[in-house]
Amino acid sequence: MRDAGQEIVKEGESIDFVFVIERGWAIRCRMLEDGRRQILNFMLPGDCFDLMSLNKARSDHSVHAATSVSLRRIQSDLFLKTVSQNPSLATSFWWAAIQEEAILREQIIRVGRRSAKERLGHLILELNRRVSAVTGQLDDHLILPVPQSILADALGLSVVHISRSLTRLKSEGLIQVTKSGLKILDREALAEMCDFDGRYLHLDKLKL
């Protein structure tokens, strides 16, 4: 169990466990010497990390709890043995690795080429699809249990930019901000605005 803000994996440390998130959200990030943080991706319930432990490699990033997080730790050797004896399980982890790589590629495009409004809209749609994969149902309501500062660090923006972008998305009738997060009002228009194509998430079989 980790409280929000606590470190799960420290950059540079050698770990001998694979982690699976059972509850809550975590973030994979890199810290610059001056204290600036770039969040690389979000990890949600069911997500598995850090597979680099299987090669006894030192972590090249940090993982922090974005909310209160419940984790399962699996000894690397036991994980390898279990996966090698279960082809369907191996396929599942292979699929998860493919999805994570695709998300990281999309993150490069999102931060490198999209405007502030486009970045936020794209991330909203991505998280909405990923949360829906956990619940099994696509819902226009997206519960966001993290502060705007985390969204800012994920998108390479300031908190002020996040606030302004939310205001623009609201004024254009694309989203509605709620107490627990937000509601997507016009999914097609939002996707068109930020050039969102959910195929990179590989959720076709779930029809999400």
Image (spheres, rainbow, N blue to C red):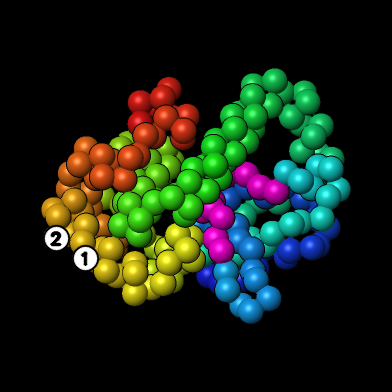
The residue under label 2 is which amino acid type? Answer: Ser
Q: Give the SS element for disc 2.
A: helix
199 with respect to 169 (left or right): right
User: Residue beneath label 2, please?
Assistant: 171
Q: Where is residue 163 in the image (x, y as percent from the top left)?
A: 29, 70
The quarter in which the N terminus is drawn is bottom right
- Residue drawn at (77%, 50%) of the image: 17
User: Residue beneath label 1, please?
Assistant: 167
Which stretch appears magenta?
38-50
- Residue drawn at (61%, 77%) of the image: 35
- Residue drawn at (53%, 70%) of the image: 4
* Residue 44 located within the stretch drawn in magenta: yes
Q: Position of residue 71 (x, y in %)?
A: 62, 55
- Residue drawn at (21%, 57%) of the image: 169
Q: Quadrant of residue 48?
A: top right
Residue 116 higher or lower than 164, as above or below = above
Q: Report whether residue 122 is seen.
A: yes
Residue 152 higher or lower than 44, as above or below = below
The residue under label 1 is which amino acid type? Answer: Thr
Q: Residues within 10 Å of mark 2 (few under 14, many from 20)?
A: few
The foreground one among 6 and 166 is 166
The foreground one among 73 and 199 is 199
**Residue that extends furthest to the front in the rendered view of this protein:** 113
Residue 185 higher or lower than 199, as above or below = below
